[in-house]
Image (spheres, helix red, strand yellow):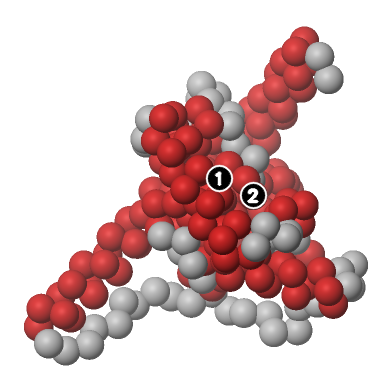
Amino acid sequence: MSEAGRDAVKIVAAADDLDLTRRALARDGHAFRMIMQKYNQRLYRIARGVFPNNSDAEDIVQEAYVRAFANLESFRGESTLATWLSRIVINEALGRLRKRRRAAEFAESSGRAVEAKIIQFPLNTGFDDPERTMAQRQILQLVERAIDNLPDLYRAVFVARVIEGLSIDETADLLNVRPETVKTRLHRARALVRKDLDAQIGPVLLDAFPFAGRRCERLTAAVMMRLGFKL
């Protein structure tokens, strides 16, 4: 696609976001659903980049949506809706991470175990994805495990750049670091993942951490209920 074509797509997407925002401000339930279905996977992956745990990541996205929708009038379109929502998710995730670390530090200093209390999002143990073969599932499990094993700083950059496909500048803006820092951390993260996986599974990374189907519907329904809409 040409540069002009990409710009045209961005303009259409921005107009669509503003229209969805106006409708959501008017308490249009369909607009809320469309926003969540449009951005659920991106926001989940970003949260997953900070918290290597499915239920924590889903809970973070749910809380971020509630916070975002409560302050939707502050979205003016200076950035894309995706960027605006992503910043809320990363702030929610990093805030929880700081709280968990403080709790762990307190437990260590006081000599007793203190468990960080995070409201767990209900897991759907019956979720199934018939489109994947067993081999693909096994490979993706290896990918996700390797990413989970990355240090926090590297994991957040890796998920944003490789899994979600954000640009270096977008990732730097999202994580509030310099573009050079993104490049350095990404290089190190890729080296660690390659070492863990023997460089055998690069092409399947695009499908890691799926968030669609029943999981997408479940999170959307939970937020709609908290917003006061009847299902």
Q: Residue at x 63, y 65 (%)?
A: 197
Above or below residue 144? Residue 36 is above
Q: Secondary structure at mark 2?
A: helix
Report the residue marked by disc 1.
160
Q: Nearer the viewer, residue 112 or 121?
A: 112
Report the residue marked by disc 2.
163
Above or below residue 134? Residue 197 is above
CB-based contact (under 8 Å), mark 2 and mark 1: yes
Q: Residue at x 43, y 38 (%)?
A: 184
Relative image position of residue 207 (x, y in whole percent): 75, 57
Q: Residue at x 75, y 75 (%)?
A: 138
Q: Residue furthest bottom?
A: 112
Q: Nearer the viewer, residue 176 or 40?
A: 176
Q: Tell me: 176 left or right of 213.
A: left
Q: Tell me: 173 left or right of 131.
A: left
**Amino acid tagged 2:** Ile
